[in-house]
Amino acid sequence: MKNVAILGSTGSIGTQTLDVISQSNGELKAVALAAGTRVKELATQAIRYDVKLVCIGKKELEEELRAQLKGTNIQVVSGMEGLIQVAEFEQADIVLTAVVGMMGIRPTIAAIKAKKDIALANKETLVCAGHIITRLARENCVTIYPVDSEHSAIFQSLHGEYHAEVEKILLTASGGPFRGKKLDELVNVKASDALKHPNWAMGRKITIDSSTLVNKGLEVMEAQWLFDVPATDVQVIVQPQSVIHSMVQFRDGGIMAQLGAPDMRLPIAYALYYPHRALLDSERLDFYKLASISFEKPDMETFKGLKLAYEAAKRGGNIPTALNAANEYAVAKFLNDEIKFLDIADMIECAMNEAEFIADPDVEEILETEAKTYELLERNYAK
């Protein structure tokens, strides 16, 4: 049996992880859970899965959670300190990190130092601190299993292959809800429009990121750290059916691809069961019904966020952090109808241009870059 701690248990990835655990016939066990503000949902999960430790994001919600868990022996903690306690939990064999944003960096570092393997569903951790995370993983003999469908597909395609023989990574994208549209068609789109992803059921923030293609840019930067390739060797290809989750091209011209229905439980299960595969009640592809798969080149002039991500990867240092922080700030504003859709990329570009470059930032410098980016945007764009 493998014991699992989940950071972000009430979110989309977290709930699907618990579904995988439910189907595991005792091969997987949830032992610790962490969530942001959803007290009732967290308490329900904790009782159902008989976990030992739970963390709620806000200190002021701790007593409410204790009341919900009255009569149990479940330990309750809160805040970043509590999140780190879950990440370090002694009984856990693997930590699935699915919290949103840069708050995943510290607990991921803590889990690695505690010798826990990582199932990574928080791309910002590698985007901003990949140089720190990958080094620590090597030093502590920890394996990082990718949970993003694209990176899991790459991981699966590389299984049994020689890394030195990789020519490039082909990272697929659905194109999001605005695929094919031009700038003048995107001027007045609303958050409700951007949240209508054609294929995937995801959280609000990542769904907006998919609509701007910033998410694909973050995945390019994540791939360079996970698979030790330069961003210039990661080619984005729009594949609207979301059937091919990504591919790897080798030096002989051969290409390995991973295909499947758009179901996040598959990459989650692959990370938790590796090197084995779980029996899942997932949809099976019917190629007779599918009939065809199409490919397109991404429009990086209309969806400038992807172009900026390649630039951030090239510049390195703390510039990816400036991009990520600006995107988090801008997406929150867009979801609150405080800015327009096209403002998101403009705010990212502003933050990247104004950031004071740090070549090899430590965690404190990464977080300081985040704070300075927020301050910059608040001055320039706050209403």
Image (cartoon, helix red, strand yellow):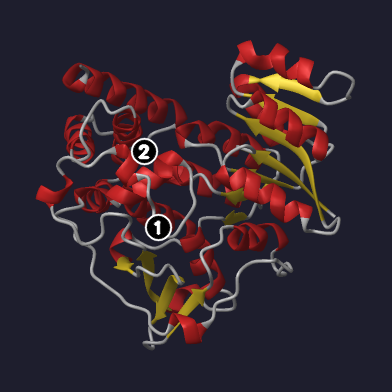
Give how far across and how far down residue 54 sits, in percent.
Answer: 73, 28
Looking at the rendered structure, the kind of residue marked 1 is Gln
Q: How far apart are marks 2 and 1 (CA)?
A: 16 Å
The image shows a total of numbered marks equal to: 2
Give how far across and how far down residue 192 sits, in percent.
Answer: 34, 40
**Mark number displayed over residue 243:** none
Compared across the picture, whether 280 is left or right of 135 comes to right
Residue in view at x 19 percent, y 22 percent: 381
Residue in view at x 70 percent, y 45 percent: 116
Residue 40 placement: quadrant? top right
Secondary structure found at label 1: helix
Q: Nearer the viewer, mark 2 or mark 1?
A: 1
**Mark number displayed over residue 360:** 2
Decide if residue 51 is in sight here.
Answer: no
Compared across the picture, whether 66 is left or right of 177 comes to right
Q: Which of marks 2 and 1 is nearer the N terminus?
A: 1
> Looking at this view, is 227 or 292 the one in front?
292
Which quadrant would the N terminus be assigned to in this image? bottom right
Give how far across and how far down residue 115 sits, in percent.
Answer: 70, 44
Q: Name the residue under label 1.
A: 224
Residue in view at x 23 percent, y 24 percent: 377
Secondary structure found at label 2: loop
Which quadrant would the C terminus be assigned to in this image? top left
Decide if residue 30 is in sight here.
Answer: yes
